[in-house]
Image: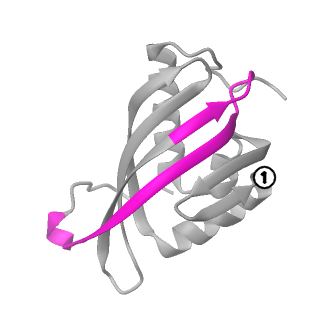
Amino acid sequence: MNPRLPAPPFTEATARQKVQAAEDAWNLRDPERVALAYTEDTEWRNRSEFVNGRAAVIEFLRRKWNRELDYRLRKELWAFIGNRIAVRFEYEWHDDSGQWYRSYGNENWEFDELGYMKRRFASINDLPIKEADRKFRWERKS
């Protein structure tokens, strides 16, 4: 496989670059494209769900974005060392009834030597909000 730069060990600049690339990719809501950032045998914990392997990530993301409509995400670098990055994030979305949510959480990422994410552990909480209280307004990306 070709390197997925930046690769570890991370500096503050390259860690920020990795976080921004993840934010940009997830906001496209394209499961196949997002999954390319992960190793074939990637391990995830997302809330209480455990996901193993790139193919399972694709299925997970399809389900997620079919349920979490008009999803818009912001990520922020929290800490980094060697091949690990910690991120805090928040995102907004609505369900099929029109109820809006803001979801908050933290992720711990571990990368292989080529810059692919090997492990992703996410803890997330959802807060119902009124549409008028949304912080993230955007044009739908295709």
Residue drawn at (53%, 39%) of the image:
108
Residue 12 visible in the picture: yes
Q: Is residue 93 left or right of residue 108?
A: left
Residue 30 visible in the picture: no
Q: Reply yes or no: does residue 68 show up in magenta.
A: no
Q: Amino acid at mark 1?
A: Gly
Asked where in the image residue 72 lies, by quadrant, the reply is: bottom left
Q: What percent of the width, then of the height, locates residue 112?
A: 73, 27
Q: Secondary structure at mark 1?
A: loop
Q: What percent of the width, then of the height, locates residue 23?
A: 46, 42
Q: Is residue 11 above or below residue 30?
A: above
Residue drawn at (76%, 51%) of the image:
54
Q: Main secondary structure of the magenta part?
A: strand
- In this rendered view, identify the residue nearer to me: 111 or 61: 111
Residue drawn at (21%, 55%) of the image:
135
Q: Residue furthest bottom?
A: 97
Tell me which colouring the rendered structure shows.
one colour
Q: Is residue 111 above or below residue 13?
A: below
Q: Which residue bears the numbered disc 1?
A: 53
Residue drawn at (38%, 31%) of the image:
78
Dot 1 crowding, Cα within 10 Å, few <14, some 14–19, many 20+: some
The residue segment tinted magenta is 108-133
Q: Is residue 141 left or right of residue 9?
A: left
Q: Residue furthest right?
A: 1
